[in-house]
Image (cartoon, grey):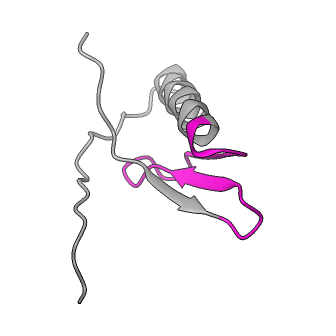
């Protein structure tokens, strides 16, 4: 089985930590004290999220989101 590649959003918090979530997997979120830790944590969260969906016979949403940086000015 080919692993899916999901787009994740990482957002810095005022306290220096990072929140991260997956647009295509509602409810799949995590955080970390560093960007690297947040990224590692969301990889684990995605795997767990998909495992639970499969255990409950729920469909696994396809990876559809993409991200692009847009210059605003």
User: Where residue 47 sits in the image (x, y, percent)?
Assistant: 50, 25
Residue found at x 40% / y 55%: 23
User: Where residue 41 sits in the image (x, y, percent)?
Assistant: 61, 33
Q: Residue furthest top?
A: 1
User: Where residue 21 sits in the image (x, y, percent)?
Assistant: 51, 52
Is 17 above or below relative to 53?
Answer: below
Q: Is residue 48 left or right of residue 57?
A: right
Q: Residue furthest front?
A: 73
Q: Residue furthest bottom?
A: 73
Is 55 above or below relative to 46?
Answer: above
Q: Can residue 56 be found in the magenta stretch?
A: no
Q: Split into 4 quadrants, where in the image is the C terminus?
A: bottom left
Q: Split into 4 quadrants, where in the image is the N terminus?
A: top left
Is 4 above or below relative to 20?
Answer: above
Q: Indicate the quadrant where residue 42 lies.
A: top right
Q: Indicate the quadrant where residue 13 lies.
A: bottom right
Residue found at x 55% / y 51%: 20
Residue found at x 48% / y 53%: 26
Q: Indicate the quadrant where residue 70 lies.
A: bottom left
Using the image as rendered, state which of residue 37 and residue 54 is in the foreground: 37
User: Where residue 22 sits in the image (x, y, percent)?
Assistant: 45, 49
| Tally of numbered tags | 0
The boundaries of the magenta stretch are 13-36
Residue found at x 45% / y 26%: 57
Q: Can residue 25 be found in the magenta stretch?
A: yes
Q: Is residue 45 left or right of residue 23?
A: right
């Amino acid at each position: 089985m080919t692993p899916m590649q999901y787009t994740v959003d990482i957002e810095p918090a005022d306290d220096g930590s990072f929140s991260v979530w997956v647009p295509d997997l509602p409810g799949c979120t995590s955080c970390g004290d560093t960007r690297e830790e947040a990224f590692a944590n969301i990889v684990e969260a995605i795997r767990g999220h998909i495992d639970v969906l499969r255990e409950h016979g729920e469909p696994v949403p396809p990876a559809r989101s993409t991200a692009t940086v847009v210059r605003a000015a």
